[in-house]
Image (cartoon, grey):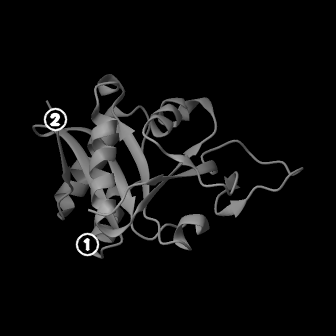
């Protein structure tokens, strides 16, 4: 069994999150990543949601209240980012539960939720999950970072090459 809750505010929590993520995900976040997120959360810029089994880290996602992606920022659409679930706990509903809570939080402020994904195979599960949950492309095409991809140009296929989607929520 697992629970979903918003992260606390303490520095010890940031260190624990950093160590837990780095130990279980097969790759590492940059040093100070979670401390910076908790600082942003304290300023009301983001909400960091955690999936926990008692005190064990299972995953997280972030709701960004003012997206860096222009297509969302211009329309005031909050964006869910950085959805991660420990590999050995995937396909057990944890990612969906994190998204349920993110959408619940967003629905209090906005009729629309935004999300983006990378276009290579590592994002395959996320791509299927988001479409299954009713997210649709926002109609602005591919972006590299915050910039629209231009036909005929060459782009590196990495985490910055993304397609952005929206979902109609309706306010609570």
* Residue found at x 53% / y 71%: 73
Image quadrant assignment for residue 34: bottom left
* Residue found at x 44% / y 60%: 112
Q: Position of residue 87 (x, y in %)?
A: 36, 27
143 or 23: which is nearer to us?
A: 143
**Disc on res. 2:** 2
Q: Residues within 10 Å of mark 2 (few under 14, many from 20)?
A: some
Q: Position of residue 141 (x, y in %)?
A: 70, 52
Cα distance, mark 1 to mark 2? 25 Å
Q: Secondary structure at mark 1?
A: helix
Residue lying furthest left in this view? 54
Decide: is 113 above or below 21: below
Residue lying furthest bottom in this view? 43
Q: Are marks 1 and 2 in contact (CB under 8 Å)?
A: no
Decide: is 74 above or below 127: below
35 displayed left or right of 2: right
Q: Position of residue 36 (x, y in %)?
A: 35, 65
Is any part of residue 49 visible from this angle?
Answer: yes
Q: Position of residue 171 (x, y in %)?
A: 32, 63
94 displayed left or right of 146: left
44 displayed left or right of 125: left
Q: Quadrant of the N terminus?
A: top left
**Disc on res. 156:** none
Q: Secondary structure at mark 2?
A: loop
| Comes first in the chain, label 1 or label 2 | 2
**Residue assigned mark 1:** 42
Q: Residues within 10 Å of mark 1 (few under 14, many from 20)?
A: few
């Amino acid at each position: 069994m697992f629970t979903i809750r918003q992260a606390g505010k303490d520095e010890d929590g940031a260190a624990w999150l950093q160590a837990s993520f780095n130990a279980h995900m097969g790759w590492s976040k940059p040093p100070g990543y979670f401390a910076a997120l908790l600082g942003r959360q304290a300023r009301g810029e983001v909400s960091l949601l955690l999936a926990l089994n008692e005190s064990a880290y299972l995953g997280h996602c972030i709701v960004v209240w003012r997206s860096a992606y222009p297509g969302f920022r211009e329309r005031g659409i909050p964006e869910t980012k950085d959805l991660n679930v420990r590999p050995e706990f995937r396909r057990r509903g944890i990612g969906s539960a994190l998204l349920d809570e993110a959408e619940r939080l967003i629905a209090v402020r906005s009729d629309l939720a935004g999300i983006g994904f990378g276009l290579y195979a590592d994002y395959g599960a996320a791509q299927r999950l988001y479409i299954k949950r009713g997210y649709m492309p926002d109609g602005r095409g591919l972006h590299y970072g915050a910039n629209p991809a231009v036909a005929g140009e060459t782009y590196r296929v990495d985490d910055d090459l993304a397609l952005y989607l929206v979902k109609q929520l309706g306010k609570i």
